[in-house]
Image (cartoon, grey):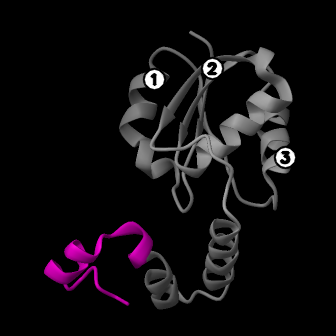
Amino acid sequence: MSPVVILPGHLCSERLYTHQIAALARRTEVRVAQLYGHDSLPALGAAVLGETQHPFTLIANSMGGAVAFEVLRQDAARVQALVLIGTTCRAELPSQCERRSEALALVRSEDWDGLEKLYAPAFFSPDNRRSNPQLDVT
């Protein structure tokens, strides 16, 4: 089995994939890419490729899917298999990029309440927010 590179979603870390990493690591090398520190999809794709020398399998979730498509655009021959989870093949909307930039500023200033207010409407439906006061931080 080829090495596996996991491309997490926005605000996700390797903790989300603990069980998958444990299961896959019995069969192959597994690495979770760090998708922070670059400010464009081409730079993220190049970083993933630069850190992975062999043909590999990509597992991508959410924003990681956008990075996976960029990796394919840059060097599809090195991607042996692709697993996409909860992602889209559509181009990122400017509003998504703006929200991610705002989130990064909130994280840098450790404004966790602001981060909750920014993302609660995007992550939780109005019905869920009404029925669960903990989710309604808006």
To which quarter of the image does residue 22 belong?
top left
- Give 94 or 72, whichever is nearer the viewer: 94
Q: CA distance from mark 1 to mark 2?
A: 9 Å
**Which numbered disc covers residue 3?**
2
Residue appearing at x 67%, y 82% in the figure = 108
Q: Residues within 10 Å of mark 1 (few under 14, many from 20)?
A: some
Residue 33 coordinates in the image, percent (x, y): 66, 43
Q: Quadrant of the N terminus?
A: top right
Q: Amino acid at mark 3?
A: Pro
Tell me whether the residue at label 3 lies in contact with that at label 2, contact meaning CB atoms closer than 8 angstroms.
no
Q: Nearer the viewer, mark 3 or mark 2?
A: 3
Residue 39 coordinates in the image, percent (x, y): 81, 62
Q: Is residue 37 above or below residue 106?
A: above
Mark nearer the N terminus (1 vs 2): 2
Mark nearer the N terminus (1 vs 3): 1
Q: Amino acid at mark 2?
A: Pro
Q: Which residue is mark 3?
A: 42
Q: Quadrant of the C terminus?
A: bottom left
Residue 48 relative to residue 65: left or right: right
Residue 57 relative to residue 44: left or right: left
Residue appearing at x 51%, y 33% in the figure = 84
Disc 2 secondary structure class: loop
- Give 19 or 93, whichever is nearer the viewer: 93
Residue appearing at x 40%, y 77% in the figure = 121
Q: Which residue is mark 1?
A: 24
Q: Amino acid at mark 1?
A: Leu
The stretch drawn in magenta includes residue 129: yes
Q: Residues within 10 Å of mark 2 (few under 14, many from 20)?
A: some
- Give 68 or 30, whichever is nearer the viewer: 68
Which contiguous range is marked in magenta? Answer: 120-138
